[in-house]
Structures are given as structure tokens and as C-alpha cells.
Image (cartoon, rainbow, N blue to C red):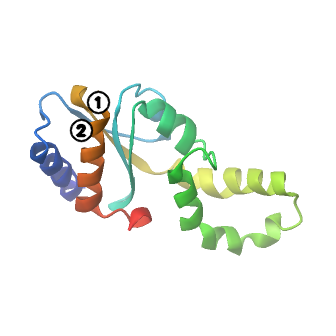
């Protein structure tokens, strides 16, 4: 985790974002709905960086889209779906006889959400990240530094 924090600080410094004004918090899906700020977020499974994203409202994007596993609401959920495809296929016998709507419901509730809700989410917020330009630059820097599994 220290390596990840070091790379976050490196990107903040490189982009001249004031470390004193920024907050770096570690949450999970339960806390995601409380972060009503613009920022960048990192999904982690232990020390494995899975996904880096940005949003003008973390609570909406992470709390209501990613953590609720809303397929089609965000690129991140689609990436998690592909990441877990082997688990979905291994459990085929459990959902194969369902109609399309119930298959999706099953996959979301029984495969996606149990994984996503157990992940750690590192959230970086700063007053400057309300502006999309520095937010996108920070996201890009973190993607280059951390090489998230779902985006490489």
C-alpha cells in the first residue's frame, strides 16, 4: 500500500496539486456514498490496483454506479464484468435456465457485488479537482504510474 501512496503523492506533486489541500482517504462501498466531492478513485484488491477513475461526484459515480454494479452505467462496471467472466462462466449451471433479466440480476447480485463491495477504494479529493482538466490529468498520471489490471 505504501508504494501506491507514494505514486499518488508523486502524481499530485508532478501536477502541482497542493498535498496540504488534498485528502486521500481509504473507504469501501459502504463509505462511498458520503464523498460528495470531485476527485479520482482507485479500486484495490489488497495491493493489486484494479481500476482508476475520475468523477465530478464520487458518491454518484462510485457509490451509485460502481458499488451497485450497474451494468451499462459506467465503463468500470463493464470492466469488472469482464474481469470476473471466468467466475460467471464457472457458475453457468446456476443461471443458465434464467431469462435475460434474471440472468443479469443473478450475475450482479451473486457475482459482481460480492467482489466489488469487498474492495478497498482509495479516493483523492482536492479543491482543484472540481475542474475537469486537472482531474483528468491526475487520472492519467495514476493510470501510467499504477498500471491498473482492468485498464492495461
Q: Position of residue 112 (x, y in %)?
A: 61, 55
Q: Are marks 1 and 2 in contact (CB under 8 Å)?
A: yes
The residue that label 1 is drawn on is: 131
Report the residue at 61% width, 50% height from top: 113
Q: Is residue 107 left or right of residue 116?
A: right
Q: Tag 1, which secondary structure? A: loop
Q: Is residue 96 left or right of residue 115?
A: right
Q: Quadrant of the N terminus?
A: bottom left
Q: Is residue 39 left or right of residue 118?
A: left
Q: Position of residue 106 (x, y in %)?
A: 75, 54
**Number of labelled discs?**
2
Q: Tag 2, which secondary structure? A: helix
Q: Is residue 62 left or right of residue 123?
A: right
Report the residue at 69% width, 50% height from top: 109
Outermost residue on the front side: it is 133
The residue that label 2 is drawn on is: 134
Tell me the CA gap for discs 1 and 2: 6 Å
Q: Please tell me the numbered disc located at residue 83.
A: none
Q: Quadrant of residue 36?
A: top left
Q: Residues within 10 Å of mark 2 (few under 14, many from 20)?
A: some
Q: Quadrant of residue 70?
A: top right
Q: Is residue 3 above or below residue 24?
A: below
Q: Quadrant of the C terminus?
A: bottom left
Report the residue at 18% width, 54% height from top: 7
Residue in the foreground of this view, choosing between 94 and 64: 64
Q: Residues within 10 Å of mark 1 (few under 14, many from 20)?
A: few
Q: Position of residue 89 (x, y in %)?
A: 70, 73
Amino acid at each position: 500500500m505504501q508504494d501506491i501512496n507514494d505514486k499518488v503523492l508523486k502524481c499530485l506533486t508532478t501536477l502541482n496539486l497542493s498535498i496540504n489541500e488534498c485528502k486521500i482517504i481509504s473507504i469501501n462501498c459502504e463509505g462511498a456514498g458520503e464523498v460528495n466531492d470531485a476527485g479520482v478513485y482507485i479500486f484495490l484488491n489488497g495491493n493489486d490496483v484494479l481500476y482508476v477513475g475520475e468523477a465530478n461526484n464520487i458518491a454518484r459515480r462510485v457509490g451509485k454506479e460502481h458499488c451497485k454494479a450497474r451494468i451499462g452505467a459506467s465503463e468500470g462496471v463493464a470492466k469488472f464484468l469482464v474481469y470476473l467472466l471466468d467466475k460467471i462462466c464457472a457458475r453457468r449451471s446456476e443461471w443458465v435456465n434464467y431469462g435475460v433479466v434474471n440472468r443479469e440480476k443473478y450475475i450482479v447480485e451473486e457475482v459482481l457485488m460480492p467482489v466489488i463491495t469487498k474492495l478497498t477504494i482509495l479516493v483523492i479529493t482536492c479543491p482543484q479537482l472540481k475542474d475537469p482538466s486537472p482531474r483528468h490529468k491526475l487520472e492519467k498520471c495514476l493510470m501510467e504510474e499504477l498500471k491498473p489490471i482492468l485498464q492495461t
